[in-house]
Image (spheres, grey):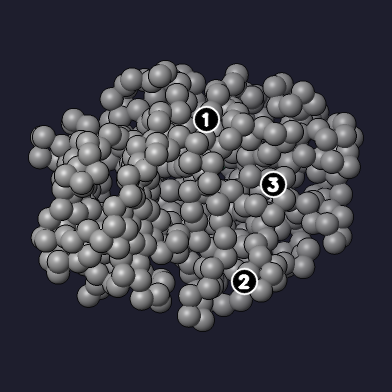
Amino acid sequence: QLYHERHRPQIHFSPKQKWTNDPNGMVYHNGTWHLFFQHYPDSTIWGPMHWGHATSKDLVHWQEQPIALYPDSLGYIFSGSAVVDKNNTAGFGKNALVAIFTHHDPQGEKEKRNNFQNQSIAYSTDEGRTWTKYAGNPVLKNPGITDFRDPKVCWYEPQKKWIMTLATKDRITFYSSPDLKGWTKESEFGKELGAHGGVWECPDLFQLDDDNGKKVWVLIVSINPGGPNGGSATQYFLGDFDGSRFAPVDTNTRWIDYGPDNYAGITWSNTGNRKIFLGWMSNWLYANIVPATTWRNAMTIARELKLKRTGNEMYVASEPVAELKKIQSKPVVLHNIQVQKSFDVASKAGKITFPARLDLNFEKNSDYSIVLSNDAGEEVAIGYNKAQQQYYIDRSRSGQTNFQKDFPARHVAPRLSKAGSMDLSLILDVNSVEMFADSGLTVMTSIYFPTKPFTHIRIESPENVTIKKLTVSSLKSIW
Ligand code: FRU
């Protein structure tokens, strides 16, 4: 095991040292999952951004690689994406990896110019090990929009062109290109739709199959602030995209994750029909001031996205990738557990060691609360409130919480599923919970900082609920 620091995630990616925020440039290529990330290698607080780099063969175990992109005369390296240029459209080589990112010029920002964010590219012909910035950067110049960033590029096969989905302040702007070097504006979307409590950032555009095998386009847009539980969060739209315009199916605002700690997430490119998402497990409300030692912040686990229908509504559901099973111990499976007020999971399942995974099935909608605790009297409660039809995660007494006023809180999320029965999966690391309710229809992610590790799990219910099936497994450190 590589990492022993207090609060160091054991099943999540975090950099060996110093600061990280958004995941960047996620691309699958020749059996390797690439994860680049916003990184400042000189401090545990945000600063001049680089692209750090990590690789994985299985989406679970990560190896940190040398820094891929350093700031230069055009500015810091802000968020962006990467593609495999199969047809050598850019002329950097067949199957070259091309990164498309924002150059952020701090001097221009200081002088209050309005064109300090521009889009640039870099390429790698050695499996992402070394990167060359294109001599003609920037490839997309800023027309005078202060927030003009986070390009996500995909190949649009019907018209054989690249599409760039760009966050442009309070809307998305789509551009197209034959070669990743010259870009033409196609359209704008969203000025009058969706949540607008803050600036739009880190978009993504891709297709998923609905339950009839019909393709639906998904447009992901992160927003900061303005999330459903305050601060940063990620909304999405369902619709159609014709190579030029995104037409939404309705005017609903949907959220990828209702919890406070899943931001700037996007999907890997070049994965065929599978769509794998990963986000930054923090929130700009407190990302710079959470308790930290040698590094600060981490990513969520990789999640598979699928379209699911409930009643007449369609949603993007997220579930932990199947690969997570690789680190899962043989589970203890318990049936028909009667919760008489409070049930100590260890009493039937044996001693719980964290990280862990819990899967619960309830026959009917019930009030319950799953409480993680330690000997210091600190707790995190995850549960469901039947009267309000809301899931919640309460971290108000979770240990160190007073570094920011909004951190100690009970966060809620609507139950979207119309099903009579309920299921819940919890992925518990030493300082985070990822809750996937109703097969991933309602998702919440939350971090916390207990002064001593959590060691106990109990389940409480005021209504003597029966848990049809409870599965408990420990998860092996990925480091
Ligand atoms: C989102 C974000 C992006 C930007 C990056 C800078 O968290 O603000 O919009 O590119 O972080 O680090």
Instruction: Read off the residue under disc 3.
Output: 271
3D distance between C-alphas at marks 2 and 3:
20 Å
Ligand 1 contact, mark 2 (Cβ < 8 Å) = no
Answer yes or no: is residue 4 visible: yes
Q: Is residue 436 above or below residue 41?
A: below
- Identify the secondary structure beneath mark 2: loop
- Identify the secondary structure beneath mark 1: loop
Q: Position of residue 109 (x, y in %)?
A: 54, 38
Q: Residue at x 20, y 66 (%)?
A: 465
Q: Amino acid at mark 1?
A: His
In primary-sequence order, the first of circles 3 and 1 is 1
Mark 3 residue crowding within 10 angstroms, few (<14) / some (14–19) / many (20+): few
Where residue 347 sits, quadrant-wise, is: top left
Ligand 1 contact, mark 3 (Cβ < 8 Å) = no
Q: Amino acid at mark 2?
A: Asp
| Mark drawn on residue 211 | 2
Quarter holding the C terminus is top left
Q: Residue at x 48, y 80 (%)?
A: 311
Q: Nearer the viewer, mark 2 or mark 3?
A: 2
Q: Amino acid at mark 3?
A: Thr
| Mark drawn on residue 61 | 1
